[in-house]
Amino acid sequence: MVSHDLIVIGSGPGGYSAAIRAGQYGLKTALIEKFPKLGGTCLHVGCIPTKALLHTAEVWDYFQHSAEQGIHCENPRLDLPGVLKRKTGIVDKHAKGIEFLMKKNKVETVAGFGTLKGKGRVEVQTATGTRMLEGRHIIVASGSEARMLPGLEADPERILTNVEILEMKQVPARLAVIGAGAVGVEFASIFARFGSKVTVLEMLPRLVPVEDEDVSKELERSFKKQGIACETGARVEKVEKTARGVRLTVTLKTGKQETIEAEKLLVAVGRKPNTDKIGLENTRAETDGGFLKVNEYQQTGEPGLYAIGDVVAGTPQLAHVATMEGMVAVAHMAGKPWRPVNKNRIPGATYTEPGIGSVGLTEAQAREKGYKVKVGKFPFLGNSKATILGSHDGFVKVVADEKYGEILGVHIIGPHAYELIAEAVAAMEAEATVETMIATIHAHPTLYEAVGEAFNAVYGQAIHA
Ligand code: NAD
């Protein structure tokens, strides 16, 4: 017998937001979660705790350089357990907030591991036994977990993933990071500011390889200036545990082999979807490398079964993508009008120092697609608010189509870049042209004036450059 209109497996930002929206639509909804608290990777061991630490790193950095502001601090001290306590407080507050929202929207939460049994049924392994739910619709939002390098296993002492690194008792003297995607560069940025000597090893030719090439170059330049060693085009040949940490044998891009010793190693080489134990074999859903194949409305090949977030093939593993895919899926099953996710309008936000915010095509991608590209670039050096903040690294880069002034992509690296990108995302969503953005009044003095200037720079008319 059908017990629910919708059963959601997984309570990350994708799953819990979908459950709330279903509640708002009046659907009888159950949300299954195996972890004792709601919120998923993003809230407990991902976005939120990491950004809490990044904020503390920024505050700590202000203390380190306070004399520049005419403020003298005698012997400031970083108390990592205190920092982690604050981080945990933020996480717990939000986990309670999600619980409240479930009650408010009449979503039933079911604690346990959910397995698809086919024909709309989900078996939940709870602490006290099994329970069978039956739904008209199901959303798989079971997320992902850190990938490990072959032969390595995470442990809390030396070889860490995004999970273990959040609970270190002391700032390590030396931290090695394998992988320069968002996870790798964000933790490098945190611990370098906390005082670790950090080495980032990336096998591809540049840091943050999904970003525009100029952004990668600027991040590497700035990281090196901050004392972070960056080895791109590097191959990790061997990882050994030693009495004091780890020893890595690495072939550098020059062909030279080097040994790197560190107290801790962070492995940040991507995430694998949590799809192998959820009973997909009982459905007609198809996978590609473990990721679920879906159509534009997030439907899998099994009638009534949708998938959203990190388990889905073809979209980036980002919390905000999961959330929007959830909105699409729930609107579709409820017969409400909604547009599918536009993959070209997904903001990227990386919270390093300097930060990164981006949307749309990189310059290289735009050229590859055959556009006649015009680029406008404006450095934060010419922005007065950046001077006030003492953050001059970086720039705003607009990639536009020469013919109609269509905005193809915007790439920002610099102070609060991950916030500044909002204007570009909204502009692209509203199909604004470069001309519209040039005519848009930008308040003075603000960081986002730099965005306005970059649009002007497309026609060589930035005022402060
Ligand atoms: P990722 O896929 O973004 O980056 C992994 C990096 O590791 C890649 O650059 C890859 O080339 C490199 N790599 C892989 N194997 C390697 C090896 N053997 N040696 C050296 N380098 C190697 O993965 P991630 O950084 O682990 O992040 C996982 C997911 O979570 C991504 O989708 C990411 O976008 C997302 N995330 C986003 C944010 C954010 O938006 N701020 C923060 C954290 C994570």
Image: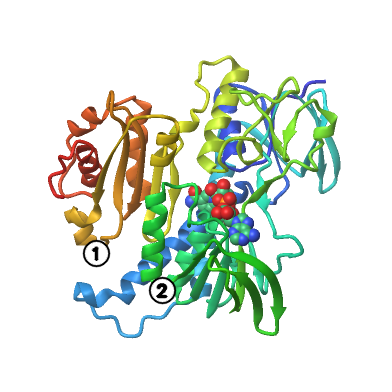
Identify which amino acid the numbered label 1 is placed on.
Answer: Gly
Q: From mark 1 to mark 2, how far is it between C-alphas?
A: 18 Å
On the question of residue 315 being in view, the answer is yes
Q: Which residue is under mark 1?
A: 390
Whether ligand 1 has any atom under 8 Å from the Cβ at mark 1 is answered as no
For residue 179, the mark is none
Kindly identify the residue that appears in the image at 28 percent across and 29 percent down: 402
Check the image and report above or below for 274 versus 288: below
Given the current orientation, which residue lies at the most extreme right position?
A: 129
The residue that mark 2 highlights is 227
Mark 2 close to ligand 1, CB under 8 Å: no
Mark found first going from the N terminus, 1 or 2: 2
Q: Residue at x 50, y 51 (%)?
A: 209
Which image quadrant for residue 59? bottom left
Q: Nearer the viewer, mark 1 or mark 2?
A: 2
Q: Nearer the viewer, residue 90 or 335?
A: 335
> Which x, y percent locates residue 186?
48, 60
Q: Is residue 243 left or right of 76 when viewed as pictured? A: right
Residue 37 vertical position relative to residue 346 in the rendered view, above or below: below
